[in-house]
C-alpha cells in the first residue's frame, strides 16, 4: 500500500509543473509502512482504496472484561488481578490507530497522521533539561492552561481523534497514547520505523508547563538553538526533527500561517529538505504573517524558521545532506524522534526494550 501511495505521489509530482519537484529516492534501509491509503482532497499525492480491518481490539477489550478505569486491573473468576500490558497489547493500540487513520480520510489532505505527529512533538517539546520539567510524561496538554497555549492551537483535533482509542484501551495513559500515536503516524505515512516504549504517567494540572517553551515560527536560527538546546538537542538533531515538515500543512485558523511544505503532505519523505535546497523561496505577499512561497508554483510554503535552516551554516550542511540522502534522513529522524518522545520520562525499562510495531498491511 505504502509503495503504491508513493508511486501515486511520484506520478503526481512528475506531472507537476515544476520539474524540480521530483522526490528523492526513498530509504530502502527501513521497513516501509504498509498502511498509507488516503484520498487526496487537494490534489496531493495519495491513493484510494485499501482494506478496512476489523477491530481485534474490540474483541480484546471484551475478553478482558472490566480491565480499565483505574486502568491496571481485570477480574478473572471474580478475582481482581493486576493487568500488565505487554508488546502485543500495545500493538493492538497501534493497529487501532492505523485502522482509524485508514478509515478517516475526510480531513485536510486526507490524513490525520500529520496532526498526530505534531501532537506527540508538542507534548514532548516542552521539556527543559535544566529543571527536568515538561516533556511527554504527564500529557498536561489535557488541561486548559497548556491546551490554550498559542502553539497548541489545532491540536484538539488530534486529541479528539485519539479519545475513542483511549476509551477502547483504558489502561493506556494519555501520555503513552499520544506518543505511541506519533510513532504510529510516522510509520503509517511511509516513514521509518520509530521504536517506542511505554512508561509515561499522566500528571495533574499543576504540572502544566509555562507558555513559551515551544518554538515561534516567526523567529530565526538563534531562537531555534535556544529552544531545542533547552531540550538537549544538537544542530544535526534540530535539523533532522524539522524534516517532519514534509508532513501536513499550516492553517490560518491555527497558527496564522498557510499551506503545505511539499506536494505530498501525507507521505513522509525528505522532500522538505530537497525543496529547501533546490527551490527558490520568495517572501509571500499576503495579508498574513511573514512566510515564504516557492517561485515555481507559488503553492508551497516555508516558515521563517524553516528558511533559517538554510541561512545558518551550521544547519545548512545537514539540510544539504538530508536533501541528497534519504536513507540518512530516515535513520537520523527516527533516532531523534525517539529521543524527543522520551525526554524526561523516568523509564523502568531499558532502551533495548523498545517495541518495534508492525505497520498495517
Ligand atoms: C523551529 C521548529 C518548529 C516550528 C517553529 C514549527 C512550527 C509549525 C507551525 C507554525 C505549524 C503550522 C500549524 C498549523 O497551522 O496547523 C507546524 C505544523 C507542523 N509541524 Fe512544526 N514546527 C517546528 C518543528 C517541528 C518538529 C520538530 C516537528 C516534529 C518532529 C514538527 C511537526 C509538524 C507537523 C507534522 C505539522 C503539520 C501539522 C498539521 O498538518 O496539522 N514541527 N509547525
Image (cartoon, grey):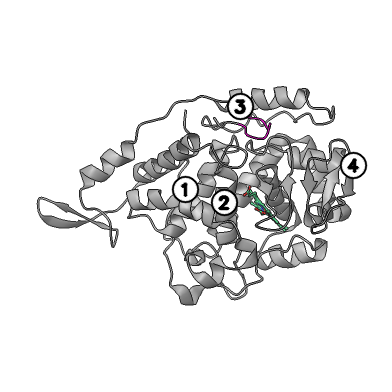
Residue 45 within the segment the image draws in magenta = yes
Instruction: Identify the residue shown where x is 68% and y is 37%.
Output: 269
Residue topped by disc 2: 338
Disc 1: CA contacts within 10 A as few (<14), some (14-19) or many (>=20): some
Q: Is mark 3 within 8 Å of ligand 1?
A: no
Q: Which residues are magenta?
A: 40-46
- In three-dimensional space, the C-alpha distance between marks 4 and 3, rounded to whole angstroms, equals 27 Å
Q: Are marks 3 and 1 in contact (CB under 8 Å)?
A: no
Residue topped by disc 1: 354
Which secondary structure class fits the magenta region best? loop
Q: Indicate the secondary structure of the residue bearing disc 1.
A: loop
Q: How many marks?
A: 4
Give the mark nearest the N terminus, 4 or 3: 3
298 sits left or right of 90 in the view: right
Residue sitting nearer the eye, 261 or 257: 257
Q: Indicate the secondary structure of the residue bearing disc 2.
A: helix
Q: Nearer the viewer, mark 1 or mark 4?
A: 4
Q: Are marks 1 and 2 in contact (CB under 8 Å)?
A: yes
64 sits left or right of 253 in the view: left
Where in the figure is residue 216, as x and y percent of width and height?
73, 64
Disc 4: CA contacts within 10 A as few (<14), some (14-19) or many (>=20): few
- In three-dimensional space, the C-alpha distance between marks 1 and 2, rounded to whole angstroms, equals 10 Å
Instruction: Identify the residue shown where x is 75% and y is 27%.
Output: 13
Residue sitting nearer the eye, 264 or 327: 264
Where in the figure is residue 275, as x and y percent of width and height?
81, 39
123 sits left or right of 73 in the view: right
Q: Nearer the viewer, mark 1 or mark 2?
A: 2
84 sits left or right of 164 in the view: left
Where in the figure is residue 50, as x and y percent of width and height?
49, 25
- In three-dimensional space, the C-alpha distance between marks 2 and 4, rounded to whole angstroms, equals 32 Å
Q: Nearer the viewer, mark 2 or mark 4?
A: 4
Instruction: Identify the residue shown where x is 81% and y is 61%.
Output: 221
Amino acid at each position: 500500500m505504502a509503495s503504491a501511495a508513493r508511486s501515486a505521489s511520484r506520478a503526481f509530482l512528475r506531472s507537476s509543473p515544476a520539474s524540480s519537484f521530483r522526490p528523492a529516492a526513498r530509504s530502502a534501509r527501513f521497513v516501509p509502512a504498509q498502511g498509507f491509503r488516503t484520498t487526496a482532497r487537494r490534489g496531493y499525492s495519495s491513493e484510494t482504496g485499501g482494506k478496512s480491518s476489523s477491530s481485534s481490539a474490540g474483541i480484546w477489550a471484551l475478553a478482558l472484561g472490566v480491565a480499565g478505569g483505574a486502568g491496571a486491573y481485570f477480574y478473572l473468576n471474580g478475582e481482581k488481578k493486576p493487568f500488565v500490558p505487554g508488546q502485543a497489547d500495545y500493538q493492538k493500540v497501534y493497529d487501532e490507530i492505523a485502522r482509524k487513520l485508514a478509515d478517516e480520510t475526510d480531513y485536510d489532505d486526507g490524513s490525520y497522521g500529520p496532526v498526530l505527529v505534531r501532537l506527540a512533538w508538542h507534548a514532548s517539546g516542552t521539556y527543559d533539561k535544566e529543571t527536568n520539567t515538561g516533556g511527554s510524561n504527564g500529557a498536561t496538554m489535557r488541561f486548559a492552561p497548556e491546551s490554550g497555549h498559542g502553539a497548541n492551537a489545532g491540536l484538539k483535533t488530534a486529541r479528539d481523534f485519539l479519545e475513542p482509542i483511549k476509551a477502547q484501551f483504558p489502561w493506556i495513559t494519555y501520555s503513552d497514547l499520544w506518543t505511541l500515536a506519533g510513532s504510529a503516524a510516522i510509520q503509517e505515512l511511509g516513514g521509518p520505523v520509530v521504536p517506542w516504549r511505554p512508561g509515561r504517567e499522566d500528571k495533574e494540572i499543576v504540572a502544566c508547563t509555562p507558555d513559551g517553551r515551544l518554538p515561534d515560527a516567526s523567529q530565526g536560527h538563534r531562537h531555534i538553538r535556544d529552544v531545542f538546546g533547552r531540550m538537549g538537542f544538537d544542530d544535526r538533531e534540530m535539523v533532522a526533527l524539522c524534516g517532519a515538515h514534509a508532513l501536513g500543512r499550516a492553517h490560518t485558523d491555527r497558527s496564522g500561517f498557510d499551506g503545505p511544505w511539499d506536494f505530498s503532505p501525507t507521505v513522509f519523505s525528505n522532500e522538505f529538505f530537497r525543496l529547501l535546497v533546490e527551490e527558490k523561496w520568495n517572501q509571500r505577499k499576503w495579508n498574513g504573517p511573514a512566510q515564504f512561497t516557492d517561485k515555481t508554483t507559488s503553492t508551497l510554503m516555508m516558515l521563517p524558521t524553516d528558511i533559517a535552516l538554510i541561512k545558518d551554516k551550521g544547519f545548512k550542511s545537514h539540510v544539504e545532506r538530508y536533501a541528497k540522502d534519504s536513507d540518512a534522513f530516515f535513520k537520523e529522524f527516527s533516532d531523534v524522534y525517539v529521543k524527543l518522545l522520551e525526554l524526561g520520562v523516568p523509564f523502568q525499562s531499558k532502551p533495548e526494550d523498545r517495541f518495534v510495531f508492525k505497520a498495517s498491511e
